[in-house]
Image (cartoon, rainbow, N blue to C red):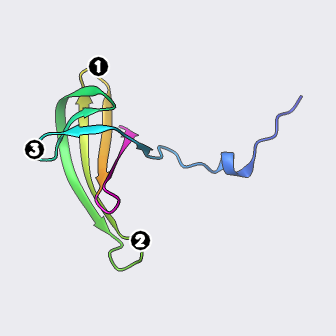
């Protein structure tokens, strides 16, 4: 029997960000991500874009290695004051 797939399921974004539980150090860098300790912050960068629109982007990104050895990219959406994670 053939299975029907909705158009919305077919058009989901690849590597879409997911909400994350992040605890930070005083300087704002991640100490833990989803209750896993951060072993190393490999890189940090900031993206500011679309400031001229009604939906500006202001994000602080971190490329991290968790204690489990897993790589992750997390970012703080500075407009929403919310953390998100993406697969590295």
The crowding category of the residue bearing disc 1, from other C-alpha atoms within 10 Å (few below 14, some 14 to 19, many at least 20), is: few
- Residue 37 is left or right of residue 70, and the answer is left
- In three-dimensional space, the C-alpha distance between marks 3 and 1, rounded to whole angstroms, equals 23 Å
Task: Tell me if residue 80 comes above or below residue 67 in the rendering.
Answer: below
Q: Which one is in front in this view, the residue at disc 3 or the one at disc 2?
A: 3
- Residue 4 is left or right of residue 11, and the answer is right
Task: Tell me if residue 13 comes above or below residue 52 in the rendering.
Answer: above
Query: Residue 35 appears in which quarter of the rendering?
Result: top left
Residue 55 - label: 2
- Closer to us: 14 or 83: 83
Q: Which residues are magenta?
A: 78-88
Residue beneath disc 3: 26
Residue lying at 28% horizontally and 59% vertically, measured from the top left: 78
- Residue 71 is left or right of residue 17, and the answer is left
Location of residue 5 in the rendering, given as x and y in whole percent from the top left corner: 76, 42
The crowding category of the residue bearing disc 2, from other C-alpha atoms within 10 Å (few below 14, some 14 to 19, many at least 20), is: few
For this orientation, the residue located farthest to the left is 26
- Closer to us: 29 or 5: 29
Q: Earlier in the sequence, mark 2 or mark 1?
A: 2
Location of residue 31 in the rendering, given as x and y in whole percent from the top left corner: 19, 34
- In three-dimensional space, the C-alpha distance between marks 2 and 1, rounded to whole angstroms, equals 36 Å
Location of residue 45 in the rendering, given as x and y in whole percent from the top left corner: 21, 53
Q: Which one is in front in this view, the residue at disc 3 or the one at disc 1?
A: 3
The answer to whether the residue labelled 2 contacts the one labelled 1, judged by CB atoms less than 8 Å apart, is no
Q: Earlier in the sequence, mark 3 or mark 2?
A: 3
**Helix, strand, or loop for circle 3?**
loop
């Amino acid at each position: 029997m053939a299975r029907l797939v909705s158009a919305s399921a077919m058009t989901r974004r690849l590597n879409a960000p997911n909400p994350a539980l992040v605890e930070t150090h005083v300087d704002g860098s991640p100490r833990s991500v989803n209750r896993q300790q951060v072993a190393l912050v490999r890189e940090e960068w900031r993206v500011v874009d679309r400031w001229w629109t009604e939906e500006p982007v202001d994000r602080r990104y971190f490329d991290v290695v968790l204690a489990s050895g897993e790589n992750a990219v997390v970012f703080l959406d500075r407009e929403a004051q919310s953390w998100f994670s993406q697969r590295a």
